[in-house]
Image (cartoon, rainbow, N blue to C red):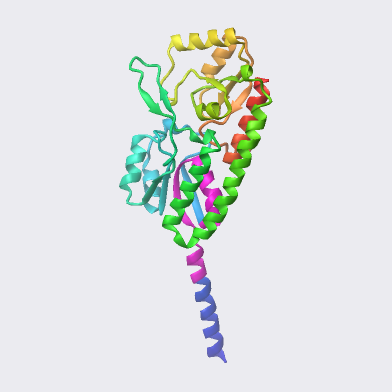
Amino acid sequence: MKRGFFICLLTFCLTGFARMIYAAPVPVITSFSILGDVTQQIGGERVQVDSLIGTDQDAHMYQLVSKDLRKMRIAKLILLNGLGLEPLSLQRAAQQSGVSMFVITKGIQPMMMTDDGHNHHQHTDPHVWNDPVLMQTYARNIANALISVDPQGKAYYQQRLAIYQQQLVELNSWASKMFNTVPPEKRKVLTGHDAFAYMAKRYRIQFIAPQGVSTEAEPSARQVAAIINQIRREHIKAIFIENIKNPKMVQRIASETQTRISGRLYSDALSKSTPAATYIDMFRYNVNALTAAMK
């Protein structure tokens, strides 16, 4: 009797242990918080996501540290945005980690931006998340990356992808309706850096920024003077600071043009909690803030 009881108990424990092994979430490293959230939405309980560049942090200014190298080496999957968002040090570290790595913007046609320096260099614009239509490809790439390292979860990931892509379709439809309430001649906005070109193209908005695609280069006095003149000439009243940037430059422009700052936009990073804790929350918040300020 006792022997049968112990065999049953051992079988139960081993079965439970096997379930624990099977259910262990896949450790995934993502480069920044927006990519981390979309990965979590698709991966659900089967993944454990850790973003190297956290909430309210500027991806353009990120510096690789030894702790991040250790995180990458014990992960099963590393996901990067690509298109120049991540610094070369992070790209190289991901490639040299020996871990499966995917660039999630694959298959997305990037916009090209020209800097205002003497050489007029062209750069790919990495801020594709500001277009929820392009984010459908982004999300599918994430699902495919997860399936590649966890093929047993294929049906689970595909089901969650389908639900999330439908949310993106609805998000784009809602955003179009919101922006259509603003007359085209009033769709003009000043932000800290040039992060909203994809949104501008999708919804026919003109964004002006003292800094280019990257937040590293400081604008010249000539650029700032030209923006101040444009705001005065075109009576632009939608002026925003960003969650990842020092607001001093935008505050100076607002002061010189006697324009009230309309609020804060979430450009390259989510917030720790409300109002931009997820990508969809962030996009909705930004659209609401923009449409209210432009009218």
In magenta stretch: residue 20: yes
Residue 109 visible? The answer is yes
Left or right: 17, with 274 as reference point:
left
| Image quarter of residue 250 | top right
Q: Position of residue 19 (x, y in %)?
A: 52, 69
Magenta region, residue range: 18-46
Q: Residue at x 63, y 24 (%)?
A: 263
Question: Furthest residue to the bottom?
Answer: 1
Q: Residue at x 37, y 51 (%)?
A: 100
Q: Residue at x 66, y 27 (%)?
A: 180
Quadrant (top left/top right/bottom left/bottom right) for the C terminus: top right
Q: How many marks?
A: 0
Residue 261 visible? The answer is no
Left or right: 100, with 39 as reference point:
left
Q: Nearer the viewer, residue 185 or 143?
A: 185
Q: Magenta-highlighted stretch: main secondary structure?
A: helix
| Image quarter of residue 62 | top left
- Is residue 195 depicted above or below 69 in this figure? above
Q: Position of residue 58 (x, y in %)?
A: 47, 32
Q: Position of residue 285 (x, y in %)?
A: 63, 33
Q: Position of residue 201 (x, y in %)?
A: 53, 27
In magenta stretch: residue 187: no
Quadrant (top left/top right/bottom left/bottom right) for the N terminus: bottom right
Q: Residue at x 45, y 44 (%)?
A: 30
